[in-house]
Amino acid sequence: MEKWNLPDWARDMNCAVTVCDENCRIIYMNDRSREVFAKHGDLIGQNLLECHNERSCAIIRRLLETGGFNVYSIEKNGIRKIIYQTAWRRDDGRVGGLVEISMPVPDEMPHYVR
């Protein structure tokens, strides 16, 4: 398994950042992601497909195949979040895996058309 070093800005963000490789193995979790999933222990090296339902696994597979993205909102423990999942690419352009960013958002959020 490759070791990934991301800059410190990802580690300290106020949103959870989780990265997997093309084999669905978790290769990076920032501090917030580790807090969110603490009850599951250290997830580095674990396979995403083992902890998701079949619907979610199908989305993960589609994103890896197409290099696409998936965005939705949730509310958990009274906190609203935007979940942004997207493929990341290697230097040669091949899909290298997925990144998920889970961002808390306020109940009312301004929307601007620019």
Image (cartoon, rainbow, N blue to C red):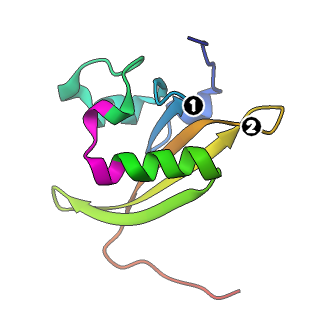
Nearer the observer, 61 or 88:
61
Is 43 on the left-hand or right-hand side of 17? left
For image coordinates 31% across by 74% down, the residue present is: 107
The kind of secondary structure the magenta stretch mainly shows is helix
Disc 1 marks which amino acid? Glu
Q: Mark 1 and mark 2 in contact (Cβ < 8 Å)?
A: yes
Which residue bears the numbered disc 2? Answer: 94
Residue 70: x and y in percent read 50, 60
Q: Write the start and end of the magenta stretch as one range.
A: 50-56
55 inside magenta stretch = yes
Nearer the observer, 35 or 28:
28
For image coordinates 65% across by 41% down, the residue present is: 88
Mark 2 or mark 1: whose residue is earlier in sequence: 1
**Callout 1 environment at 10 Å: few (<14), some (14 to 19), or many (20+)?**
some
Q: Is residue 43 above or below residue 1?
A: below
* Number of dots carrying numbers: 2
Disc 2 marks which amino acid? Arg
Which residue bears the numbered disc 1? Answer: 22
Helix or strand or loop: what does disc 1 sit on?
loop
| Residue 5 - label | none
Q: Is residue 51 above or below residue 69?
A: above
Residue 13: x and y in percent read 50, 40
